[in-house]
Image (tube, grey):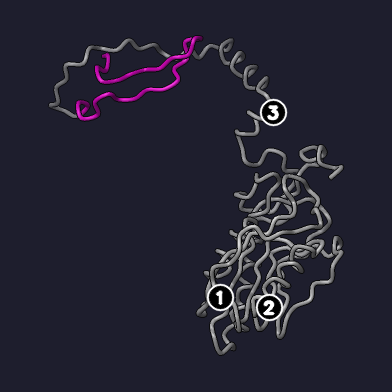
Amino acid sequence: MADTNMVVLTTQDSGILARFLTNPAASHPGATSTTQPAHQRRPNKSPALRARRLATLASLPSAAAAMVSAEVGIDYVLWTEAEVSARVGEVAAELAADLRALPEPAVVVGVATGAFLFLADLVRRVDVRLAVDFVRVESYGAGTESSGKPRITADLKVDVAGKHVVVVEDIVDTGNTLSHLIAHLEKKGASSISVCTFLDKPARRKVSVQLVGDGKFYRGFECPDYFVVGYGLDYAELYRNLPYVGVLKPEMYKKDSSN
């Protein structure tokens, strides 16, 4: 029996694309409707049609295919979601123990955008009073290599003068961005500055990172010299939402190899 409250959208090859009710209340027993019956067509499930659809999907441009999954371009997983969660918990416990000994609440400064997931998971496991703010420092753009000339494009709102600051980073590699930010926070009057980074890539270090006062360096994982994405880390603003850390296939960023 035809459903008098159903609109059916079909494709040119007779496949049903979508159905939706024009009057949901009329589908209940006892309801009445004056809507005229809508023409319905059954989906064509023939092997030939399925083959044509698969061929169409295979011929999609690479940009459209990349929209299908957030994992397109990942070579392999370096640290799983479970491993990330466990390590963040360990770092948080160490950080909490140190902050608990401070006379006043610390200020946790996340470096946007990469540190947002790590910072959120971290501070929720640190059971002490603290303030949280973000700063934006840009040095990469859409490439894979730091320009070596970081600049602060969005500053803090919280006053850090006379306070202990914990800078939360997604990754420390050359050290240029971090050193620039530490100098900026010191000028703002921070009494001591620690660094808590999710990943540390010492193989890429060009600048020795100097902490301030009684600052301490915390890290989640030591990262090999691969281009990694996921858990906040990106390539051209993609892949941040992956719950794990993966190594990106070189062909995904080879066009930027000259940067």
Q: Secondary structure at mark 3?
A: helix
Residue 96 in view in this figure: yes
Query: Where's the C terminus, which quadrant?
Result: top right
Horizontal and vertical percent position of residue 244: 65, 53
Q: Amino acid at mark 1?
A: Asp
In the image, which disc is placed on residue 159? Answer: 1
Horizontal and vertical percent position of residue 202: 83, 65
The alpha-carbon separation of the residues under discs 2 and 3 comes to 45 Å
Task: Say few, some or many: other residues with alpha carbon within 10 Å of mark 2 (under 14 / 14 to 19 / 20 or more).
Answer: many
Mark positioned earlier in the residue sequence (2 or 1): 1
Residue 85 in view in this figure: no
Q: Residue at x 68, y 38 (%)?
A: 72
Q: Pointer 2: what residue? A: 193
Q: Pointer 3: what residue? A: 62
Q: Residue at x 64, y 76 (%)?
A: 188
Q: Are marks 2 and 1 in contact (CB under 8 Å)?
A: no
Asked if residue 149 lies left or right of residue 161, the reply is right
